Amino acid sequence: MGALTTRKDTVSRRAALRTGALIVSFGLAGWPASGWPQEGATPLKSGPAPRPVDPHQVDGFLAVNADGSVTIFSGKVDLGTGLRAAIPQMAAEELGIDVAKIKLIEGDTATTPDQGPTSGSTGIMRGGIQIRQAAATARRVLIERAAQRLNAAPDSLETADGHVRPKSGGDGIKFADLIDNGRFNLTVDPKAPLKDPNTYTIVGKSLPRPDVPAKVTGSHVYVHDFSVPDMLHGRVVRPPAIGAKLVSVDEDSIKDLTGVRVVHIGDFLGVVADDEWTAVRAARALKATWSEWNGLPDQKELIAALRAGPLARDEELASRGEAGTAPADAKTIKATYFWPIQTHGSIGPSCAIADVKPNQATIWTASQSTHRYRHAFAKFLDLPLQAVRLIYLDGAGCYGMNGHEDAAADAALLSKATGRPVRVQWMRQDEHGWDPKGPPQLLDLVATIDADGRILDWLTQMWIPEATKGLPSIPLLGPQAAGLDQAHGIATGLISQNAEPPYDADRSRVIAHWLTDTPLRPAHIRAPGKIANCFAIESFIDELAAAAEQDPLAFRLRGLSDRRGIEVLKRAAAMLNWQPRLSPGPNIRSPISRGRGVAFVHYKNQETLVAIGMEVAVEHASGTVSVERVVCAHDCGLMINPDAVRAQVEGNILQTLSRALMEEVKFDHSHVTSVDWSTYPILTFSDVPKVEIDLIDRPTEPPLGVGEAASAPVAAALANAIFDATGVRLRRAPFTKERVKAAIG
């Protein structure tokens, strides 16, 4: 892949639109010859930074250009989710312009509004909606201005092809001719009327993603390919134990390597060189002495360690209904479920480039949260916020927070120390060993059912780390080692969500035992908390159905009142050709038994509705679980781009199958030991099952998130299918063949 270089002249936000900055265009058959600019090719020079982009103003989100195109400024970024197609579709639909004339700039803190992190499935649901409302506001004003010029009633005009024109036909006025000095100077109106979904011609169509051609032909520029003039390559030397302190450094140990410079700030130790291979060699050869540290708990006793705390507090998160007197024939069922520590497992290592000057800094990063981490970088670099610019470039996927921000912080520290731009690319051992982890989760469930299987009482108790309130960013490794000022605390995401059953119960409660810490540095990981919680809840529902001697699908349908939830369950069951079964019926005399399971989630209890069905084969002798078929019924309201939705659902399913079957971070008392693909295996192509997806389009409903929801019920459906095949209930993930074999006995 070819590298990009930067220019040294200052280019304003508006000038970047005129010059085009970086325009990516394609020539593959079936794709439109259109692209989007990324202003990342222009670093800030000394002097005043651009004014903050106002997210309340139409000009903060879009600009009408003299050539008839429209540029959209998105604080949300495309992580492979298809936002580069979907957001232009939403804007083009509301404005009345060909989507091929939409250009997109994303994740640049100097030119895009702060729309919050790209997380929690909010890219379309919040970020896209904000841009759609800005476009609707712009359309209304364009029509009003055209009405004055044409001496016509506003309701007699429409926007189409970048013009405002009479609905009856005739010449119109170009958008650009209705904008004073290229600016709307207009506040976004949250009540500006949207177009009728029945009139949509762009939204709801499976338009091709504009980034695919360059990606499949190898010309797409990832952050790993990006370069700037006079750039050094850096590597950071991490300690052999997580909490070790740097005692001494022998710089003479690398004196034979030409042009290498050692950077030593507190416990932060790094090297820079003119080429990457020399930097790698220097980092490996540099001799350093570290203190001993063995502060991690025994992994075999992790569940006991979670129960032991230390606790920050206990909190009742939910309470519905009143406790009653259970009849004599009622049954009480108890179970404990555990979800392990997991890494993001990004296929490519984290990478970033930083150019830190005495009075300003520019960082090119694959961060999902450039605006949030701008504050973190300004703090530890001791620079004013307006002097720090973060620019998003595609990197290795993570759906949460992997090592992107840490690699960027490494690069920033090395750049500040050397006075030159520095590129840092982590090694595989860095990625697996040091990226923030999805934290462990422990759940105790207790329920009482009557003779008819009706849930009388339900209690969920959770042992989970408590995120630090108001934390703008988690502590980053480099600044932490260097002893620099930054935020302190932990971030885990909303990991307590979906811990309450969506089914009718006379009384239900959820209690969180909030932990003050977790063994390894935690951070958001895809569908944070919801996979573990849904695994426990939906597995336990199967246990209640078995105790009531009822079919698990019928048990769910009887207890579910949400009509959209009922529909996704029925659709998934139809795809499986579900036949009621009261209890598991494995053929223990056969070497392989087969089963099917189902699970449901109403994501965050208020968003996307998903039902997953699964067919598995279990080899008794080895404990190997083969997932043969997965079906999914998915309701995310209005679908902007159905193909992009389908791709996201497929990705959710496959990634979570990997997490449920294989993935668990291993560690000893001092450090992570699963630092490669042998010790931390993931799903391979040969493991991929047949996947069938039924997308339910509801064009009159709000669009909901797609990036996470389908992952939540996967592990539960898998566990339920294994139970159906073997009669063995797995309550601890991952379901490795060793664990399955031991359970079968």
Image (cartoon, helix red, strand yellow):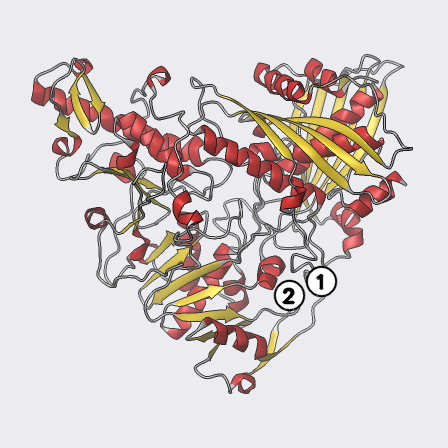
Label 1 neighbourhood size at 10 Å, few (<14), some (14-19), many (20+)? some
Establish if 371 lies above or below 172. below
Q: Give whichever of 252, 197 is nearer the camera.
A: 197
Q: Label 2 belongs to which residue?
A: 243
Residue 89 percent location from the top left of the image:
35, 31
- Amino acid type at circle 2 is Gly
Q: CA distance from mark 2 to mark 1?
A: 8 Å
Q: Residue at x 13, y 39 (%)?
A: 181
Left or right: 520, with 66 as reference point: right
Please state, as top left, top right, bottom left or bottom right, where the C terminus lies in the image. top right
Which of disc 1 and disc 2 is earlier in sequence?
Answer: 2
Residue lying at 39% horizontally and 53% vertically, measured from the top left: 219
Please, what secondary structure does the residue beneath circle 1 have?
Answer: loop
Name the quadrant containing residue 525.
Answer: top right
Q: Which residue is mark 1?
A: 295
Task: Determine which quarter of the picture holds residue 460.
Answer: top right
CB of mark 2 within 8 Å of CB of mark 1?
yes
Q: Residue at x 52, y 67 (%)?
A: 483
Q: Is residue 502 above or below residue 247?
A: above
Residue for point 54% across, 67% down? 481
| Most foreground residue, 362 or 273 | 273
Circle 1: residue type: Gly
**Residue 523 position in % (x across, y down):** 57, 49
Q: Quadrant of the N terminus?
A: bottom left
Left or right: residue 257 versus residue 23 is right
Give the number of the disc on residue 464. none
